[in-house]
Amino acid sequence: MNFRRLGNSGLQVSSLGLGTNAFGKRADEATSIRIVHHALDSGLNFMDTANIYAGTESERIIGLALKGKRQQAVLATKAGLPAGRGPNQSGSSRYHLQQELEDSLRRLRTDYVDLYQIHTFDPSTPLEETLRTLDDMISSGKVRYIGASNYAAWELMKALSISERQRFAGYISTQCSYSLADRTPEKELVPLCLDQGVGIIPYFPLAGGILTGKYASNRAPAGSRADTDPSFTRFLTEERIQLGEEVGRIAGEVGSSPTALSLAWLMNRPAVSTVIVGATRVEQLQDSLQSVSLVYDAETEDRLNEASCRFVHSEPFAVYRLPEK
């Protein structure tokens, strides 16, 4: 396994990370625990979850899976998207974040998280309040590092400036949709992160499975995201399907799977620290792990860049935001 610093911090994370959105939903408890153990045994240490994944089941299952293995994992979770319908059950106010951190720690069966991330920018809470709260969490020992998610470049830069001015701990990472099928972060976010030393953690690195070729001819295989979540079909555009087919052809020529090639391309992008990939079976994770050792030549890089260049200026594949109150 290869390890990299997360942004300009001293924290070392595996170049491939485990996304756990499917735990407790498309992967049952026993399967999810096997996936976590296989990831750790393979040298993968970065594991990403959130307070709302599978209605809190993801965190609960990870807590079970890491019993006796907590020190092997760099554990990341998030808060900020709606955890309920009542007042103070979403956003990044001090009230909400402190409650959600305590609940996450209980479910994860740990007294600290390595990376605590704000799931999305909150337009209704002053950034100073959020950043002061996160700084206090670090001082308490319950959080080691902090990160952002779904922040626009200007929002991230504003947060970094406030942290510097107020001498708060600053964000060391940011999560965003980033893949061959969504290169929109390259317009503003990547240059910002390179300049400020913030590590990028891409989510949807395979565009929800489109880059694996499984949706060729608009098919939705049994158990796939489009099969279990019909709303996902909105992502299955002709351009993306064609890109998935082209990536499959290029992968075949270099003797790789399209999954491994797509992930390896992303790992080699500037500012990317770790790429989180989901799995509903151990075999799925094993395929993704091949990306860590995959080497390809400049011609293959050029072909991938050419095939995906139109997605630099397209709409983002996904972004999660809160409405203004």
Image (cartoon, grey):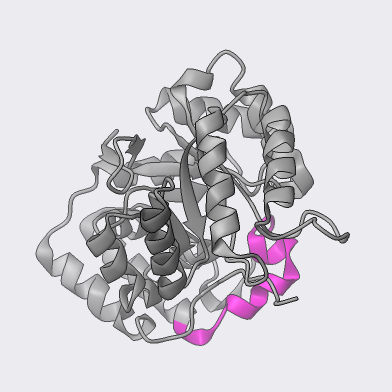
Between 215 and 304, the one nearer to me in the picture? 304
User: For the N terminus, which image quadrant?
Assistant: top left
State whether residue 292 is above or below residue 91: above
The answer to whether residue 230 is left or right of residue 17 is right
Instruction: Please report the residue visible at 39 percent of the width from the left and 77 percent of the height from the top.
Output: 184
**Mainly helix, strand or loop, the magenta region?**
helix
Between 124 and 275, the one nearer to me in the picture? 124
Between 159 and 49, the one nearer to me in the picture? 159
Q: Magenta part of the protein: which range?
A: 222-239
State whether residue 2 is above or below residue 276: above
Instruction: Please report the residue visible at 29 percent of the width from the left and 81 percent of the height from the top.
Output: 309
State whether residue 206 is above or below residue 154: above
User: For the C terminus, which image quadrant?
Assistant: bottom right
Does residue 91 belong to the magenta stretch?
A: no
Instruction: Please report the residue visible at 70 percent of the width from the left and 76 percent of the height from the top.
Output: 323
The answer to whether residue 309 is left or right of residue 158 is left
Residue 161 x/y as whole percent: 38, 63
Is residue 98 visible in the rendered structure shown here?
yes
Instruction: Please report the residue visible at 29 percent of the width from the left and 53 percent of the height from the top.
Output: 267
Residue 77 x/y as whole percent: 58, 43
Judged from this view, the residue extending furthest toward the front is 166
